[in-house]
Image (cartoon, rainbow, N blue to C red):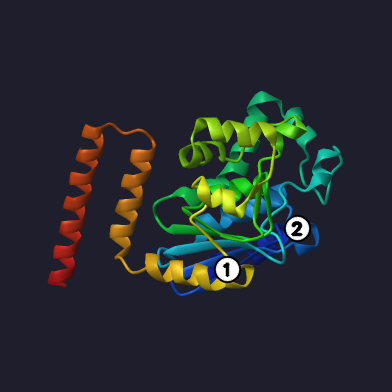
Amino acid sequence: MSASSAVDADLLGRGGVRLVLDGPRATIVLERPDVLNAQTPSTWEALRHIGEKLGPDVRVVVVRGSGRAFSAGLDRRLFTGDHVDGEPGLADILQRGPEGGAALIASFQEGFRWLRSPERVTVAAVRGHAIGAGFQLALACDFRVAAEDARFRMAETSLGLVPDLGGTLPLVRLVGYSRAAEICLSGRSVGATEALAMGLVNAVVPVDGLDSAVDDLVAAVTLPLPGATRETLALLAAAADGASEEEQLRAEREAQLRRLADLAALARS
C-alpha cells in the first residue's frame, strides 16, 4: 500500500496538517496560517499517524509551516480550560490522574518522536516564529534550515509549565546544558544569526532562498544508499547518547559488517 493511500486525510485535516509526497521526499506542512500554525492535540495525532503510515520508499521528511511562521506553539485557547473543537485542554490532562495524564502526554510525544528515528532524514524548514511546541518540533528533526527572520523561543516556563514534547534532550545535545537552561528559563527569543552561532541550526538563508536551500540539502542527503544513511544516523545518535569509546567502536564494526553484507548482496543481484 502506498503512503498516500494509507494516510487518513480527515485526521490530517482535523490536525491542520497537509502531507505532500514526491518520490523519496515527504513534506509535512502545518496548515493553520491564520493562527501562525498553532498546534493542538489533533496536530500531534496527525503527525503520529504520518510517522506510522509513511512507506519505506520515503527517505527524507521536510517539516514546514504555511505562511509567515513555522509554528507559534500550542493553541492558546487550550489554556482556558474550555474545550476547543473537542480538543483536550491542559485541565483535562490533570483530570485523568497521574497514569492517565502521563499516557496522554506520551501519545502527544509520539507525534514528534518518530522524526528522530534513523529510518529517514528529517529537515525543519523554519521561518518566522518557532515557539514552544513549534521550537520542539524543529528540534525533533535532524537538520534545521532557518530563514533570516526565524525566531526560536521555549515559552513553557514563562507559563508555569515545562517543555514536554521531547525538546529538552536535543536542545542540550545541540547547545549544551548551561545555554539550554538559559534559553528555557529566560524564555527569551533566539534569532537566526545567534542560533547559527550556537549550533542550534545548520544554516541561515534569506527568506526567499529557504525553499531552494532545503531542496539542495534534500538532494545531498539522498545521495548515499538508504542503508548507509540509516546506519550512520544510528551511530551518531548512539554517540550523542553518551556511548563509551568501546561501545561506539563495536557499534561501528557491526554496522560496517551489515553494510558490507548488503553491498555484496546487491552486487550478486
Relative side of 195 to 36, left or right: left
Can residue 103 be seen in this snapshot?
no
- Residue type marked 2: Leu
Up-down relation of residue 168 to residue 253 (above or below): above
**Dividing the picture into quarters, in which one does residue 251 lie?**
top left
Tell which residue pokes out farthest to the top in this image.
98
Question: Are the residues tagged 1 and 2 within 8 Å (C-beta)?
Answer: no
Q: Position of residue 58 (x, y in %)?
A: 44, 66
Report crowding for label 1: few under 14, some 14 to 19, many 20 or more residues within 10 A (C-alpha): many
- Residue type marked 1: Leu
User: 262 or 199: which is nearer to us?
Assistant: 199
Report crowding for label 2: few under 14, some 14 to 19, many 20 or more residues within 10 A (C-alpha): many
User: Which residue shows up at 38% across the image and 64% down it?
Assistant: 221
Can residue 106 be seen in this snapshot?
yes
User: Which residue shows up at 60% across the image and 41% down it?
Assistant: 165
User: Which residue shows up at 62% across the image and 72% down it?
Assistant: 208
Relative side of 112 to 249, left or right: right
Q: Position of residue 66 (x, y in %)?
A: 69, 66
Secondary structure, mark 2, is: loop
Residue behind mark 1: 210
Q: Quadrant of the C terminus?
A: bottom left
Query: Which is more N-terminal, label 2 or label 1?
Result: 2
Task: Determine the CA span between mark 1 and mark 2.
Answer: 18 Å
Residue behind mark 2: 36
Mark 1 vs mark 2: give the one in front: 1
